[in-house]
Amino acid sequence: MSLLLIIALVVFGRTMYTRIRLLMALEPADRFDQITRRLKSVAVFALGQKRLVGRKKERLSGVMHAFIFWGFCVLLIRSLNIYGEAFVRGFHLPLLGDHSLLGYLYVFLKDIVEGIVLLMVILALYRRAVIKPKRLHNSWEAYLVLGLIGVLMISDLLVDGARYNLISLYNNPGHLDFFNNPRFGSEFNWTPISVLAGKLISPLGAGANRVIMTMMFWLHIITQLTFLNILPLGKHFHVITALPNVFFKSLDYPHEKTKLLDLEDESVWEDESLGINHIHQLNWKQGLDLYTCTECGRCKEVCPTYTTDKPLNLFDFNMQLKEELLENTDNLIKRAALANTLPSDGDAENTEKIKAEMAGLNSQKQLVGDVIAEDTLWACTTCRACEEVCPVTIEHVPRIVGMRQGQTLMAGVYPDELNVALKGLERNGNPWGIGYDKRADWAEGLGVKMMADDADVDYLLWVGCAGSFDDRAKKVSTSLVKILQKAEVDFAILGVEEKCTGDFARRVGNEMMYQMMAQENIETLNSYQVKKIITACPHCLNTLKHEYPQMGGNYEVVHHTEFIYQLVKTGKITLNSSLGGALTYHDPCYLGRYNAVYDQPRSILQSISKNGLTELDRHGPESFCCGAGGGRMWMEETIGKRINEERAGEIVSKQVANVAVGCPFCLTMIEDGMKELGKEEDIKTQDIAELVAQNMA
Amino acid sequence: MKILTTVKKVVDVELNMHVKDGALVEDGMQYVTNAWDENAVETASQLKENNGAETTLVSIGGGDNTDIIRRCYAMGIENGIHVDDPALEKADSSIYAKVLQKVYEAGDYDLVITGKQAQDTDSGQTGIILAEYLGLPCVSNVIALEVIDDQHIKVSRSGDTGTEIVELTLPAVISVDVSINEPRLPQMRGIMMAKKKKITEMDLAALGTSADEVGADAPKSEIIEFMASQSRQAGQKFEGDAAEITAKVVDLLANEAKVI
Ligand code: SF4
Ligand code: SF4
């Protein structure tokens, strides 16, 4: 026993040690703050299995998994008991002996749980082999692990079954221990399933039962130790890493914010160390993410690119990165050790030498091109649907943006179509490239104040590029102005002084252009001492609110739907429920998933619609992207089906007359989708501001 | 192959121009690389990448042209020359061509690539006059280019009757149209690295010439006055019921415009 245990633990320990050292060799990430909140998220996501049980569409498999997980927690205690018993006869963990009710309750729980887990394993096997859900990859590993779990349960039940037989039918020849506290009765009154298992083998006689008991005991131990050592090798590593991964998840923003790169530092350009081009540039949390992927496929099932036949399949994406990571284990560990020897005294010669040596240990493979295909990288709309459903809270988007930074900043390779938009940004501060002096033309004659004339206002209305230059979105700006004026809100706009927030530049990895935009905007905003901002663009909202603080821009930013909601609530405007025909709402990704604004738009729409609000199949946190985010607005969509048509089709299937949106890009995409489907006459696509302006008292 | 590319700094025509007292209002104006010259730079960069050409650019006038030249470095150009001189303030195409001639003669170039015209004056003369001064073959409005060998290139030009394909013996001058390529955006890394790269600054004397020699004292053409173009009056828009609109339009045409 000792030998077995030592071998198993040493092998396991070694694997784990290497895996942890590999993580420590990666880039730093700050995830040790706010311990209480972290523990809470472990409670919700891991112990509570929120994303497994919480999703309606996946309830069955979620419940199955949850029971297996909870079962494992219960049985972990049992295992400790067994190993203890192997060394000390009658061993029990404190409090779980036969002198307390707790001990009995545990025995009961363990018995029931083993039965349930066994049932779940059978169900899971059935589901994999017969139902074959599309998102699953049917790997041998999955069957092996399910099989092992099954064997664990059966063997343990048989150990207890045989024990019961020997004690109760054959007068306990070996003086086996069992609970027999006069207060609670015999242990076996508490273990119906083991007794049932015992019944199955009782006809075999005392001798056979003894043999079975011993064999099953060893089978159980050996299976368990094998299982332990198989875990780190494949997707079941998540059994070990999921809890820490959830513990270390991002807290204040749905995923790790894009790092503010220091572009003035010459050495980063010379060393080509910006962005993620090589596997060693991942940070340890991103590495842990890769360890933890359970290969469940939930992410790809909700991904707007995968579901419209584009090559981005997150499942493969993760696997390929993980393979590359593990392949480079030794070199990365060596590389990190070298990095620690870099002189801090500025000894140039030595630094060069070490840097050259480190470069020699870099993986030969470029992440984009050799490991991940270019089309795959650029397909992502950064919609975050994948992250929202991942049961182990893996963060895909920051990794994708990091790799795009590598491509844009270092390699200079990115989709050509982006050039026009980026040049527009460079010259005129907007992706359309329209003269910056025309930015406030839309507001002419509306009586809107300019900050330059009067900065002493309560709110700044941040119009955004679409709202300023796109003919369709200008109508939204006009509607919003009408609402604000009606509610007598004291506001002004920046006019020609406003520039693109830089959102799309940042998502396509062009950190330089982003920082240029952000810096100029922040200077302008701070010079007017702006405190509160209203905007109709969720992308602007997200950047102003979450990204500008990195560069010294701190403002209270609200989306116009949040603001209108407040205006209605405080009675500043009154809505008529005069909108006829069925109405639905498309959640913009950067409003919903990024900023958790789901209820206010719905509440407004409920108030103006005669017929309430029809929800789309994919709505709220699982809303389906319109296809414009992540800079995709400015790229061609040449592969597969068009995402916006897919979404428009979903809206059409709901037989509504109106679809409301809360984002100028969604507005374009959905409206275009409707046109493509020939439905633009039947289904009107409008921004919530437009609907409110039409239905105000 | 050694290539000389010309790059002009021009006012951004995306912006509304305002005229006051016969002069442009400088306030709020911004300057950019002439769009056609970006195509010329892109053509040169491609020749560098695909045919190992050596690339030099020259920019004349404009005061501080550092940003513009660095941007071209980041697009792949290797050397930059900036010629500026107080005498060049009123330069026209002919004077530019004279200065370019001097630059050309100081180097040992096989091909001069210019943009077909500049966005500010739209005259489209400089490249052609330069070829004339140098006595070199010239093809304007080039929309495609192919290298045959060290001495020969084949270009397509968009002519009045269709695409003309011309074979040229080098050295030669070509001017390119926007349709020849899609200029790349400068590489970010290139921009940062370009900060360290030198720009050769010269005035006319350094170039070995004088205001007199290039004709700067007596420009052949001169801008006398700027005038704002008459903007068309906004038309009337009709929205709503088709029958009503028709009636309204007919009424307006008959009674207000009195055309029917
Ligand atoms: S990333 Fe998350 S959702 Fe996607 S396969 Fe892995 S565990 Fe499942
Ligand atoms: S962010 Fe959206 S588009 Fe990108 S991989 Fe995730 S689900 Fe797909």
Image (spheres, rainbow, N blue to C red):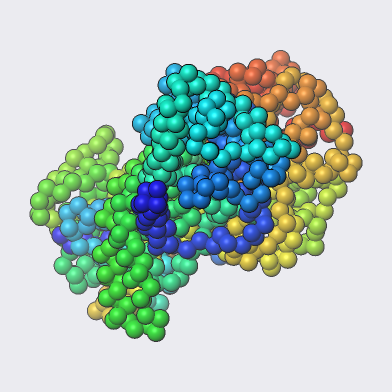
Q: Determine which quarter of the picture holds residue B62.
A: bottom left
**Residue B104 is at least partly visible in this image:** yes
State which quarter of the image contains the C terminus of chain B.
top right
Q: Seen from this angle, which residue lies furthest top?
A: B243
**Residue A626 is at least partly visible in this image:** no
Q: Is residue B168 above or below residue A615?
A: below
Q: Residue at x 27, y 39 (%)?
A: B159
Q: Determine which quarter of the picture holds residue A615.
A: top right
Q: Residue at x 28, y 40 (%)?
A: B158
Q: Determine which quarter of the picture holds residue B198.
A: bottom left
**Relative to the observer, which residue lies in front, B187 or A327?**
A327
Q: Is residue A65 above or below residue A421?
A: above
Q: Residue at x 86, y 48 (%)?
A: A488
Count of number-bearing discs: 0
**Residue A411 percent across, percent down from the top left:** 34, 56
**Residue A388 percent across, percent down from the top left:** 58, 40
Q: Residue at x 51, y 44 (%)?
A: A82
In this picture, residue A522 sits left or right of residue A245: right
**Residue A200 percent across, percent down from the top left:** 50, 20
